[in-house]
Amino acid sequence: MNAQQLKQLLNDVKDGRLAIEDAMAELKKLPFEDMGFAHLDTHRELRNGYPEVIYCAGKTTDQVTAIVKRMLELDYSNILATRADSDVAQALRALTPNVEYSTTARIAVINRKPLPQPAGTIAVVTGGTSDMPVAEEAAITAEIMGNNVKRIYDVGVAGLHRLLSHLDDIMNANVVIAVAGMEGALASVVGGLVDKPVIAVPTSVGYGANFHGLAALLSMLNSCASGVAVVNIDNGFGAGYMASMINHI
């Protein structure tokens, strides 16, 4: 249930279109719904402004499908399923035709009610092309939450002139998401160039001493640039969500 649906419920009671007992029955289902294998948080959009997001890794295709089916029945606005494989996407298309799937980001999107976009832009910047899966997870997450996203890929510090050629777009953004593996230096460089929040995303891209993203994570955490905050390794979703919250303030 979202804020609009709750207002409608209260107005129906106020105007006599709905009995108090029936309204109470609806409100009893408000916090969550027990599906046996999952507790669907039906209250999250009302609390946080965006409904529960499905993390598909570790779930079976049948479990993901059952959750999405119930979300559709409950008239959820937009549905986002992260770390979804092609089998999940195919199963979801059997439920509803308007499923968009990104093989790069491994995200399935059911966009039922496009949200109004704020004036600001979120810039998603990557060190290399290999960082794109994480960057696309961030970009698509931000887009479905109603944001204008500018993608600036493969502009890492190994060729600083590439980054500087996009400086206007980066400096004009309300929020910058800096996605990089290897030594993760991109976040510090971007943080030293802009007066807006920078969300750093370390990726597991790199050779042995990168330690599957740990080196980039520690580098970003130790950034000497002010205004740089760091999410977990490969957590494009978390970066996109946080950037959206900042951009909507």
Image (spheres, helix red, strand yellow):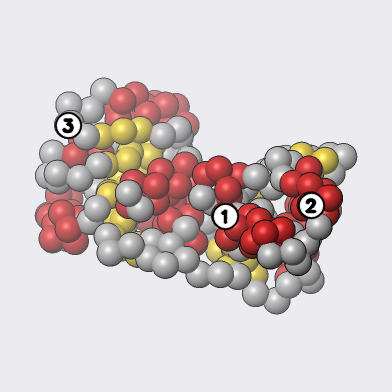
x, y percentage for residue 56? 68, 47
Q: Secondary structure at mark 2?
A: helix
Amino acid, disc 2: Ile
Q: Is residue 201 above or below residue 94?
A: above
Dot placed on the residue nearer the N-terminal end, 3 or 1: 1
Residue 170: x and y in percent read 20, 55
Looking at the image, residue 73 sits to the left or right of residue 246; the answer is right
Q: What residue sits 78% from the left and 43% below the top?
A: 28
Query: Of the residues under marks 1 and 2, which one precedes in the sequence?
Result: 1
Q: Which mark is residue 155?
A: none
| Residue farthest bottom in this picture | 97
- What is the tally of numbered marks visible in this picture? 3
Whole-angstrom CA distance, mark 1 to mark 2, is 19 Å
- Residue holding disc 2: 20
User: Which residue does the numbered mark 3 point to in the structure image?
Assistant: 225
| Residue sitting nearer the eye, 21 or 35 | 21
Q: Is residue 116 left or right of residue 17?
A: left
**Residue picked out by circle 1:** 3
Crowd band around label 1 with a 10 angstrom C-alpha radius: few (<14), some (14–19), many (20+) = few
Q: Residue at x 23, y 28 (%)?
A: 223
CB atoms of marks 3 and 2 within 8 Å:
no
Q: Which is more toward the observer, 66 or 134?
A: 66
| Residue at position x 55%, y 43% in the image | 47
At mark 3, the secondary structure is loop
Let me know if residue 77 appears in the view.
yes
Residue located at (35% from left, 33% from top):
230
Q: Who comes first in sequence, dot 3 or dot 2?
A: 2
Alpha carbon separation for disc pair 3 and 2: 56 Å
Amino acid under disc 1: Ala
Kind of residue indicated by mark 3: Ala
